[in-house]
Amino acid sequence: MTPKEMRAERVKLHEQAQAINKKARDEKREFSGEEQGQWEKLNSELDRLAHQIERDEREMNLTDDFKRSPLDDTVSDGNPKPDLRGGNKETTKYTPGDAVRGWCLGNTAELTPEMRAAAAAYKINPDSKELRIKLPKKAARSVKEAEQRIAEVEQRALSVGTTTAGGFTVADDTSMYANIELSMLAFGGMRQVSTVLRTDTGGPLPIPTCNDTGNTGAILAENTTTTALDAVFAQLVLDAYKYSSRHILVSVELMQDSAINMDAFMGRILGERLGRITNTHFTTGTGSGQPNGVVTASGLGATGAASVGGLFSYVKLVELMHSVDPAYRQGGNVGWMMRDSSVSQARQLVDTTGRPMWEVSMQAGDPDRLLGYPVYINQDVAAVALSAKSVLFGNFSKYLIREVREIILLRLNERYADLHQVAFLAFMRTDGDLLDAGTDPVKHFIGNAA
């Protein structure tokens, strides 16, 4: 089935599961053994289809990357396609993948004259062991937007920036940066809902805050003077912690293979690794020597009873939702955040009239909804348990992610030369914290053991 067909199938399965639930509820009884088995089977299939949709769409993107060849920019006689947009005719003979492949091989016997020419066309020095990758000033807000950027940069003439001390800079419009960003989004749920600020340097970034909610105006009698009531300002300071992808080993044969789009291939691997570690810290980071995670920074909104093992209920979710100030329950990126295993429980919930709280989405890229708000899946949120902060609700755009635009990629030729492999290591600098003036834009449910 296609992803579209699988989404339609999920809606049907959801309706069947709700029908079983409604029948038992109308008859004021628990599930029979058969009904319990059917309900669990339907929900298991719902989860399987959701993961299959995600895998298929990701595989289609990867397949496109690997099928794309440097020959895509030449006509059948081997000559470069005419550049109808004007610009540099020399660079149209090569793709950024050619240039990156040349840099990956370095000044070795495997570096062909064609690869060196490609690197020269894009002003990348194969002799340098450092490559600087510039992220765009404006971060993509969704996986779909990142994919659109990749499509756009592949449709226009590409060029690279000028040399810098210690290395060479890949321009903003190469697909390596776009694939890094796509992979970080796909593997980091926090990036899809937070506000991402990108800076050229890594110095402390102060963000002013002010909580004036406790102050009011006053009514005055005639001929009475006013009194001062100053607003109190504070600030949130974002730093730039250094993160590493750790070593990535790539065989020389893979880098020589002209069927591999090297800049997209390297971008995805680097992005996935950096996306995993930073998402963990943006979610549960301690704020000491690492970002302050959204769970750590969130306020208490609702508490579960020990008698139910930390499970949440309809009443507790409503309590959590209304614990957040109405001003924060408006606008974009307002919703729920939980891990995938918690979704199974949320699907079973109904309101006091017996109406299902869960709404399955039919729109690609649009998350399912709970009580009318989107549900964002984040595997770094704790599972349901006693004393676990297992559900978040609020305005996630108030979580700020600060990134230094430049990602540095190092090439280690000699270390694994006996294996005919080359090691690559990427560094990025980032920080994150919840912009909270004292009124808790994001709150959590905790399954308290008390």
Image: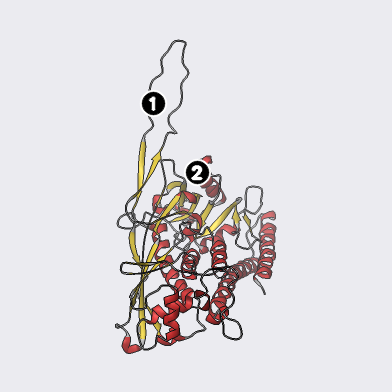
Disc 1 residue type (three-letter): Leu
Towards the viewer: 152 or 333: 152
Find numbered disc 2 in the image and state the secondary structure of the residue it sits on.
loop
Percent of width and height locating residue 95: 50, 76
Q: Is residue 294 left or right of residue 315?
A: left
Where residue 208 appears, as percent x and y from the top left, is 38, 42
Packing grade of label 2 (10 A; few <14, some 14-19, many >=20) is many
- Which amino acid type is marked by label 2? Val
Kindly identify which residue carries mark 1. Answer: 229
Name the residue beneath numbered marker 2: 324
Q: Quick one: SS at disc 1?
A: loop
Q: Position of residue 408 (x, y in %)?
A: 36, 68
In the image, residue 318 sits, relative to residue 99, either above or below, namely above
Between 339 and 111, the one lying in front of the other is: 111
Q: How crowded is mark 1: few (under 14 residues within 10 Å), some or many (20 or more)?
A: few
Horizontal and vertical percent position of residue 407: 38, 65
Rendered image quadrant of residue 235: top left
Q: Which coloring applies here?
A: secondary structure
Q: How many marks?
A: 2
Q: Are marks 1 and 2 in contact (CB under 8 Å)?
A: no
Image quarter of the N terminus: bottom right
Q: In which quarter of the image is residue 385?
A: bottom left
Asked whether residue 450 appears in the rendered view, the answer is no
Q: Which residue is drawn at 59% across and 71% down?
A: 57
